Amino acid sequence: MADEHERHENDIIVSEILERRYVPAYLKSVPWEGFNYAGHEIKIVESTDLYGATVWPSALVLCYFLEKHEKQLCIEDKNIIEIGSGTGLVAIVACLLGAQVIATDLEELIGNLKYNLLCNTKMKSKHVPQVKELIWGSNLEMNFPKSSLRFDYILAADVVYNHPCLEELLETFDHLCSENTIILWVMRFRKENMLLENTFIQKFKELFDLEVIYDLPSLSIKLYKAKRRNCQK
């Protein structure tokens, strides 16, 4: 009965998550998707020819969680960095909830990321969001010196998949995370990548305590909360 009740609750959460996306009433020359979060309609311009310029379900899960638990998370005025921001939806929602946000991604995605952030937060957010290029594992100390890092949260949605930079991704998590930083990481599991994904999780758990917040089998997604395991750096 407990398992059945949990499945029912998860089905309700998934339904609420997917309802936040809406389709434009008519097509425009520039393709975009619409979302409802933090009391605002958010319009996200996508690029189907770039993997990171599409809104994936993991981002919707993280946005839903941030909005649903903004009071418990004390999001307002918190320093937040998102890695692998893509279209910027998660960063936009965090910004609209009052956080000080740095959105990061590769150079080829920065232009579209900046556009979406500006269009959806201008005159609507307490703090102006920043956008920075971040190549995982590259020039981390130069671009993000540990002496000045004070992130309350690191956000990440669907950053683990079949790509060659998983070691660098783990290095980036490690570098950006200080003693009190909380990581909110959404992982979408793919059958073809199970060995790779499980290997990454095991390596991740060597550095961080990991807790499952949402387990959503119908989306093949888990939302994790993590904190540094060893405070002595």
Image (tube, helix red, strand yellow):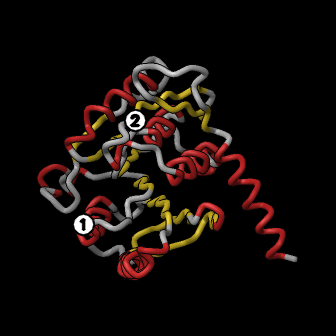
Q: Amino acid at mark 2?
A: Glu
State whether residue 33 is above or below residue 55: above
Q: Is residue 151 left or right of residue 222?
A: left
Label 2, residues with CA under 10 Å away: few <14, some 14-19, many ≥20: many
Secondary structure at badge 2 equals loop
Name the residue located 34 percent from the left edge and 68 percent from the top edge.
162
x, y (%) of residue 231? 35, 73
For this view, does 118 lie left or right of residue 39? left
- Front: mark 2 or 1: 2
Q: Position of residue 47 (x, y in %)?
A: 35, 37
Q: Residue at x 49, y 27 (%)?
A: 43
Q: Nearer the viewer, residue 126 or 200?
A: 200
**Image point 50% across, 34% down: which residue?**
98
Q: Residues within 10 Å of mark 1 (few under 14, many from 20)?
A: some
Residue 52 image point, x, y percent: 34, 47
Location of residue 132 (image quadrant) = top left
Q: Nearer the viewer, residue 88 or 209?
A: 88
Q: Which mark is residue 117?
A: none
State the residue in front, 20 or 69: 20
Marked residue nearer the N-terminal end (2 or 1): 2
Work out whether 146 lies above or below 27. Answer: below
**Distance of label 2 from label 1 (alpha carbons):** 23 Å
Look at mark 2 in the image and give the residue it sits on.
46
Which quarter of the rendering shows the N terminus? bottom right
**Residue 138: percent from left, percent from top:** 15, 59
Residue type at mark 1: give it.
Cys
What residue appears at the point 53 percent right and 51 percent down from the top-left corner?
57
Q: Secondary structure at mark 1?
A: loop
- Tell me the quarter of the image containing the C terminus: bottom left
The residue that mark 1 highlights is 165
